[in-house]
């Protein structure tokens, strides 16, 4: 990997270099000091994986340098580090083409490394222009250019893409149909995912823009949520007020999808993402099913989901319903409040066993007023839980 650090302050360049070298000792890290160097046009940006840009600097205190770099052919993602920054500068930086933003005096190592890792350009689909699919397969949608790979699995990948004019950014989830690896069924589930989410219009559910199909692959163009996931925020526990607010947003989203006849079935902090203005949205309905859909697509008796947040019935491959999603939300609520998962074990099957048989987790004294809500959401028997998301939302509203 190759990084470029641009800043007039040599000490700050060394600080950023240190953060990168701790994580990637073999990376090539170049530095550029605008006040004494030449024109930025001399920089070979196409050979870089990521640029770390200080602000203000001598060549572009008003973000001019950022805009000039972004106009360069094959410019990599740029992360901006600003002195005396504020929310207005953040907005302007993102509009000018930065992919993320840090106040210089508030850089934390793990957060920085997570951001850098997520924006590294690890793959492009083709070297001639990185258009994802043949324009004829876009069903009239605008062409989009890949910027970075955000996630890669065995049969699907997620990319950050932008329109040709750079005015719109979206997340593109791509599935390649591989029949000899179960691709046919996964292809059906992938298309079902689009149909399921596209019916729902709710501020806490990710927005779907269009679907493209071409030869042996399909893609979903969806809203890009650029402020990280809930998984990044729960490690040390959240303030009770914040945790309740997040739980109410998640519960509101569940109410909307349940009303549409949909179960999420894989609710976890990593599938809850944040927008720049702070609201959250549920993503990744790859395991979602329409309650009235025949079991031929998802298969009978198969366990889908993440064990740490899985209801007892789902862990034992029994039929699931809305109350199963509410159980997962209860697991998330406990983790938001305490920074710990409610049930852990040395193996996935051990976690599944504890969901069904271990004593329900207890909250510490300052949080005991939330214990009744937690007890009902995490009840082993479904009849003892909240029977709908609306019922849970009413309880959360009372304690809020």
Image: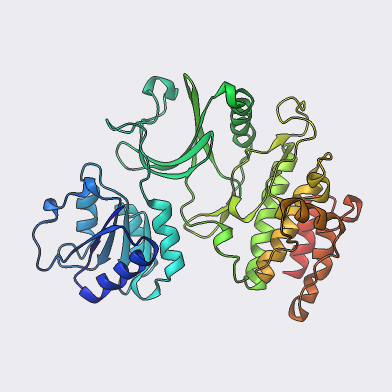
In the displayed structure, 388 sits above or below 157; it is: below
Q: In percent of the image, x 82 and y 44: which residue is there?
A: 316
Say left or right for 181 vs 26.
right
Percent across and percent down for residue 55 are 25, 67
Q: Is residue 317 left or right of residue 121?
A: right
Instruction: Give residue 134's position: percent from left, percent from top.
Output: 38, 23
Q: Which percent across, then down, holds residue 218?
A: 50, 27
Left or right: 309, with 383 as reference point: left
Residue 22 to residue 350: above or below: below
Nearer-the-camera pick, 46 or 22: 22
Identify which residue is drawn at 40% across, 26% down: 133
On the image, which quarter does residue 145 sit in?
top left
Q: Residue at 14% across / 55% down in the picture?
A: 40
- Res. 88 in view: no
Inspect this view and state whether residue 12 appears. Answer: yes
Residue 184 x/y as whole percent: 61, 22
Viewer-side residue, 283 vs 216:
216
Quadrant of the rendered structure where residue 258 is? top right
Horizontal placement of 304 versus 286: left or right? right
Q: How is the image coloured?
A: rainbow
In the image, 89 versus 177, the foreground residue is 177
Most extreme residue toward the bottom, as rendered? 365
Tell me what residue is drawn at x 30 percent, y 73 percent: 15
């Amino acid at each position: 990997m190759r990084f470029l650090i641009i800043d007039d302050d040599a000490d700050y360049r060394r600080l950023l270099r240190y953060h990168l070298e701790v994580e990637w000792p073999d990376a090539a890290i170049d530095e550029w000091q605008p006040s004494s160097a030449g024109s930025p046009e001399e920089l070979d940006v196409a050979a870089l994986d990521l640029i770390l840009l200080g602000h203000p600097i001598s060549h572009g205190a008003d973000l001019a340098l950022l805009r000039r770099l972004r106009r360069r052919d094959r410019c990599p993602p740029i992360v901006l580090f600003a002195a005396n920054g504020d929310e207005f500068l953040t907005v302007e930086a993102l509009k000018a083409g930065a992919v993320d933003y840090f106040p210089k005096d508030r850089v934390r190592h793990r957060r920085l490394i997570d951001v850098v890792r997520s924006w590294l350009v690890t793959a492009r689909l083709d070297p001639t222009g990185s258009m994802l699919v043949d324009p004829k397969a876009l069903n009239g949608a605008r062409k989009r250019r890949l910027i970075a790979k955000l996630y890669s699995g065995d049969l699907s990948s997620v990319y950050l893409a932008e329109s040709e004019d750079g005015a719109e950014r979206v997340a593109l989830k791509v599935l390649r149909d591989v029949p000899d690896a179960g691709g046919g069924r996964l292809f059906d589930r992938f298309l079902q995912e689009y149909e399921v989410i596209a019916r729902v219009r709710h501020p806490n559910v990710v927005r779907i823009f269009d679907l493209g199909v071409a030869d042996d692959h399909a893609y979903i163009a969806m809203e890009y949520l650029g402020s990280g996931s809930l998984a990044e925020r729960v490690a040390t526990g959240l303030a009770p007020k914040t945790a309740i607010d997040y739980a109410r947003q998640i519960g509101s989203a569940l109410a909307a999808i349940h009303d549409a006849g949909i179960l999420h079935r894989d609710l976890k902090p990593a599938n809850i993402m944040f927008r720049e203005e702070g609201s959250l949205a549920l993503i990744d309905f790859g395991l979602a099913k329409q309650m009235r859909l025949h079991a031929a697509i998802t298969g009978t008796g198969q366990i889908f989901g993440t064990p740490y947040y899985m209801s007892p019935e789902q862990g034992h491959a029994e039929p699931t319903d809305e109350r199963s999603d509410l159980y997962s939300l209860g697991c998330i609520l406990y983790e938001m409040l305490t920074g710990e998962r409610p049930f852990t074990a040395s193996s996935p099957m051990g976690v599944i066993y504890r969901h069904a048989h271990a004593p329900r987790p207890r909250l510490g004294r300052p949080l005991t007023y939330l214990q009744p809500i937690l007890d009902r959401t995490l009840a082993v028997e479904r009849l003892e839980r909240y029977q709908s998301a609306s019922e849970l939302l009413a309880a959360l509203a009372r304690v809020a």
